[in-house]
Image: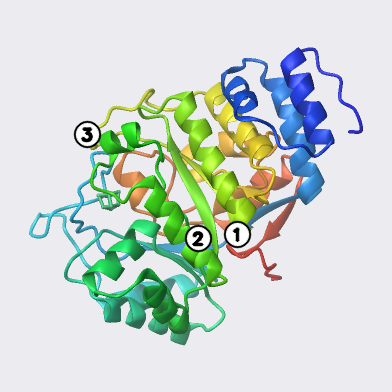
C-alpha cells in the first residue's frame, strides 16, 4: 500500500501516516475507537499486520498453571480469588504441580503459563522450586510467569527488590512475563475495578525493570467494564511510550472483561463484533512499535478471534490446557482447544499457522 484511498477523510489521513511510518496521535486513536467504518479501519490494520508478519499467524501449545486462588487483594473485577479457608480455596503443592506439568507434557506442550493470587503463605522458595521442577521435567519448556502485581508482592513479602526476585526466578528457569495485571492504567477507573492492586505507574515500572534485565514481556489491557475511550487511549499511549524506551514488549493482549461472579458489571455481557474489531485494529495501528497483537480465542470465542486475524491480529493464543481464571468469570469457550483446531482456524482464514512460544522462537514439530 503505497497509497490507500479511503472514503473516510480521517481514516485516510491516518492511513497516510501509517504508510509514511509516522506514529498516529492519541486523537487518531480516539477516532478509530469510535468509528463505525470498520472495513476501512481494518484495511489499515491489515496492511500493518501483513507488513510485519506477511501471511503468518502464530499459535501456541501450552498449559495454564494457576497455582493458588488465595489472594489478599480480592479485586472487585476478579471471580477467581478466594480468602484462605473458603470452600473453593486451593494452593497447589510442588508435587501436585509436577504431576500436572507431567500430564500436560504428555500432550506435547511447549510452554507453561503461570499466574495466581497474592498468597501470603507462599514465599520465594515455593516459586523457585516450581520453576526448577518444571525445567527438570522438560528443559526445553518455555516458562512465562507471574504478573507485575505478583512480582511487586513477592518483593514486599520477601523484603527484597523486584530485581532480586527476577534474578532468582531467571536462575530457576523464568523465560518471559505474561503481562497481566495491567487492567486499565487510568487511576479513576483502576481505583474502582482493582483498588488495592499496584498502580498503573508501578506496573510500568516493574515491566521497565524486567526489560532492563533482558526479559521480554507482554502487555495486557482489560476492556468492556467501566473504562472510557480516553482511558483506553491513555493505556495504549503509556505502553507505546515505555516501548520506545525499552523495546521489551513482544505482544499486546487486550482482554475482554467477563463479569460472572464479580462485583463490577460489564458494559455488555459479551462485547460486540464491532467493539472488538475497533479495539484490536486501533491497537495494531497505534502500537506501531509492538510487534505482535494477540487475540485470545478463549476470551473472544474462536469465531471472533479468527475474524480478528484480518483486523490487525497475528496471534490467536494457545491451547491453554486447564485455564481457570477467565472461566471462573463465565467465559463459555471450551478450556482446551486442540492444536489441530487452532491450526484449522488459521488455515481457514487463509493464513499460514506458525507454532511458537511467548518469545516467538519457532517450534518446529
Ligand atoms: S485479579 Fe489478581 S490480584 Fe486481583 S484478586 Fe484476582 S488474583 Fe488477586
Per the image, the residue denoted by label 1 is 246
Q: Is residue 109 visible?
A: no
How far is the residue under mark 2 from the one under mark 1?
7 Å
For the residue pair 90 and 22, the one nearer the viewer reads as 22
* Residue farthest to the left, as pictured: 85
Q: Is label 2 in a helix, a strand or a loop?
A: helix
Camera-nearest residue between 41 and 247:
247
| Residue found at x 58% / y 62% | 358
Q: Relative to 351, is 136 on the left or the right? A: left
Residue wearing tag 2? 208
Q: Secondary structure at mark 3?
A: loop
Q: Residue at x 64, y 32 (%)?
A: 281
Query: Could you tell whether 8 is left or right of 329 in the image?
Result: right
Using the rendered image of the protein, determine whether residue 49 is visible from the camera's viewpoint: yes
Please provide percent x and percent y for residue 46: 75, 35
Residue pointed to by mark 3: 263
Residue in the image at 49% along x and 66% along y: 210
Residue 65 in the image, given as x and y percentages of width and height: 37, 64
Q: Earlier in the sequence, mark 3 or mark 2?
A: 2
Measured in 3D between alpha carbons, the distance from the residue under mark 3 to the one under mark 1, in whole angstroms, is: 36 Å
Mark closer to the chain start, 3 or 1: 1
* Quadrant where the image shows the C terminus: bottom right
Q: Is residue 148 above or below residue 257?
A: below
Secondary structure found at label 1: helix
Tell me the quarter of the picture where residue 151 sits. bottom left
Q: Residues within 10 Å of mark 1 (few under 14, many from 20)?
A: some
Label 3: few (<14), some (14–19) or many (≥20) C-alpha neighbours in 10 Å: few
Point out the tag, 2 or 1, that comes first from the N-terminus. Answer: 2
In this view, the mark in front (3 or 2): 2
Callout 2 crowding tier (Cα within 10 Å): few <14, some 14–19, many ≥20: many
Quarter of the rendering containing residue 67: bottom left
Question: In the rendered view of the protein, which quadrant contains the N terminus?
Answer: top right
Amino acid at each position: 500500500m503505497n497509497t490507500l484511498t479511503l472514503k473516510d477523510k480521517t481514516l485516510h489521513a491516518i492511513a497516510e501516516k501509517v504508510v509514511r511510518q509516522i506514529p498516529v496521535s492519541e486523537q487518531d486513536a480516539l477516532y478509530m475507537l469510535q468509528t463505525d467504518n470498520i472495513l476501512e479501519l481494518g484495511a489499515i490494520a491489515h496492511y500493518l499486520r501483513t507488513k510485519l508478519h506477511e501471511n503468518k499467524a502464530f499459535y501456541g501449545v501450552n498449559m495454564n498453571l494457576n497455582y493458588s486462588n488465595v489472594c489478599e487483594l480480592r479485586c472487585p473485577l476478579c471471580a477467581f480469588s478466594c480468602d484462605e479457608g473458603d470452600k473453593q480455596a486451593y494452593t497447589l503443592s510442588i508435587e501436585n504441580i509436577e504431576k500436572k506439568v507431567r500430564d500436560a507434557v504428555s500432550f506435547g506442550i511447549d510452554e507453561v503459563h503461570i499466574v495466581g493470587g497474592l498468597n501470603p503463605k507462599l514465599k520465594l522458595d515455593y516459586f523457585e522450586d516450581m520453576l526448577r521442577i518444571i525445567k527438570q521435567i522438560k528443559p526445553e519448556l518455555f516458562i512465562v510467569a507471574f504478573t507485575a502485581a505478583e512480582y511487586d508482592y513477592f518483593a514486599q513479602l520477601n523484603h527484597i527488590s523486584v530485581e532480586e526476585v527476577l534474578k532468582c526466578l531467571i536462575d530457576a528457569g523464568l523465560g518471559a512475563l505474561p503481562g497481566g495485571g495491567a487492567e486499565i492504567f487510568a487511576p479513576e477507573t483502576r481505583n474502582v475495578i482493582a483498588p488495592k492492586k499496584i498502580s498503573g505507574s508501578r506496573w510500568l515500572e516493574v515491566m521497565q525493570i524486567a526489560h532492563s534485565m533482558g526479559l521480554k514481556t507482554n502487555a495486557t489491557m482489560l476492556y468492556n467494564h467501566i473504562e472510557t475511550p480516553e482511558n483506553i487511549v491513555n493505556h495504549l499511549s503509556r505502553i507505546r511510550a515505555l516501548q520506545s524506551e525499552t523495546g521489551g514488549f513482544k505482544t499486546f493482549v487486550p482482554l475482554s472483561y467477563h463479569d460472572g461472579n464479580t462485583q463490577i458489571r460489564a458494559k455488555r455481557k459479551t462485547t460486540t463484533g464491532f467493539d472488538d474489531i475497533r479495539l484490536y485494529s486501533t491497537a495494531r495501528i497505534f502500537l506501531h512499535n509492538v510487534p505482535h497483537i494477540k487475540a485470545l480465542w478463549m476470551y473472544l470465542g474462536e469465531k471472533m478471534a479468527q475474524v480478528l486475524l484480518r483486523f490487525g491480529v497475528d496471534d490467536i493464543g494457545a491451547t491453554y490446557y486447564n485455564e481457570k481464571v477467565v472461566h471462573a468469570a463465565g467465559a463459555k469457550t471450551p478450556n482446551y482447544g486442540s492444536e489441530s483446531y487452532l491450526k484449522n482456524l488459521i488455515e481457514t482464514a487463509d493464513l499460514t499457522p506458525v507454532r511458537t512460544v511467548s518469545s516467538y522462537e519457532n517450534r518446529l514439530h
